[in-house]
Image (spheres, rainbow, N blue to C red):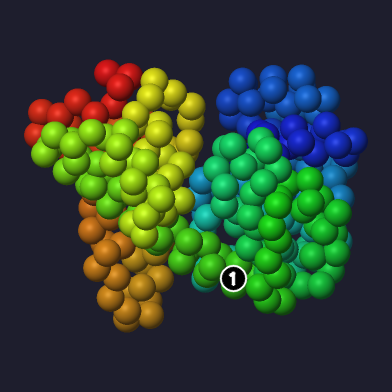
Amino acid sequence: MGGPMASRLAASGYTVTGYDIQAAAMERLRQAGGKTASNAAEAAADADLLITIVASAEQVEEVLFGDTGALTTLTAGSTIMVCSTVPPDYMQTLGQRLQTRGYELLDAPVSGGVAGAANGTLTVMASGSAAAFEACEPLLPILTAKQYRLGDVPGHGSICKVINQLLVGVHHAVTVEAMALAARVGADLEAVYEVIANSSGASQVFVNRVPDLLSEDVTPSGVLDIFVKDLGIVLGVGQEAHFPLPMAASAHQMFLMGSAAGLGQERPIDLIKIYEKLAGLHIQQSQ
C-alpha cells in the first residue's frame, strides 16, 4: 500500500523520496516521479514529513530507530505519520518517545487495501496532536476519501483499526465458510453470490472478494499472513482488557491454519483453499 500512496503524492507535485526493500516498488516510485533512497535514513534526510507504512511494530522500530533508521537524519520538529496496523499501546508509547526527541506523531492506520491506496480512496482513522494533524492535513485528501479525527494523542486511531480488523478478519473467515458450504451442497455459486450480495447476509468482504473466487482475476487484495498478525493484535487487546473474543479467536485459528498450509503470501480470501483440500472442492475458477 505504501508504494501507491507515495506514487500518488509524487504525481500530485510533492517531492517524495521513498525507501522499500523491494526493488520493484522503488522502480514504480521512480516512474511516478519520485526519488528513491538506499535506506530509511537517506529517505528522511531532507524530509518535513515522514510517512511509514510497514507490516508490524517491529518494522516501525527498525524504520525509525535502526542503525540506518529515519531518526538518525530526520530534522527535529518534523512530523511522523505511522499508517501501520500495530498495537494501540505501542502507538501510545511511541508518541511519548518521539515527543521527548522533538517529533510529532500522527497515529494514522488506514483501510482500503492496495486498490484504495492506488485510487486515493483509503479511510484513515487518526489521532495525535493538533500540530501533527496540521502537518499531515494537506496530504490526506490525496491519499484518502474519508478522514476521521479520533483523539489528540496517539493510540486512539489504532484502537479503531483493531475493531476494524476484528470485523474484516471474521468476515473473511465466514465468507469462505459460507461459499464452501454452497459448493459442497451443489449450489450455483454465481447465483448464491448474486442473492447474498443483495441480502442481509452481505458484507463488504463478501461483496468485494467473492468475485475473486468466481473468476480468473488474481489481482492482489492483501496478504493472508497480515491477518495472522492483525488478529493476533486484536486478541492481545482483548486479553489486556480481560475481554472474551471467541469469534476473533476462531478466525485467527483459521488464518493460522492457512499460513501453516503454505498460503501465507496468498490473498486472505484464498483461505477457501483449506476447505477445498478438506472436502475435495473446486471453487476457484482459476484452478
Position of 197 relative to 127 (above/below): above
Q: Is residue 69 left or right of residue 85?
A: right
Expressed as whole percent of the image width and height from the top left, the position of residue 194 reads 37, 41
Expressed as whole percent of the image width and height from the top left, the position of residue 8 reads 76, 36
Q: Which element carries disc 1, helix, strand or loop?
A: loop
Task: Please state which amino acid type lies under the numbered disc 1.
Answer: Gly
Instruction: Pick the residue in front: 15 or 66.
Output: 15
Position of 20 relative to 162 (above/below): above
Expressed as whole percent of the image width and height from the top left, the position of residue 71 reads 73, 51
Which residue sits at x=33%, y=74%?
A: 239
Instruction: Pick the residue in front: 219 or 242.
Output: 219
Q: Quadrant of residue 226?
A: top left
Mark 1 neighbour density, 10 Å: few (under 14) some (14–19) many (20 or more): many
Instruction: Pick the residue in front: 105 or 219.
Output: 219
Q: Quadrant of the C terminus?
A: top left
Which residue sits at x=38%, y=24%?
A: 215
Task: Give the residue number, with chain letter if any, for mark 1.
Answer: 155
Q: Is residue 222 visible?
A: yes
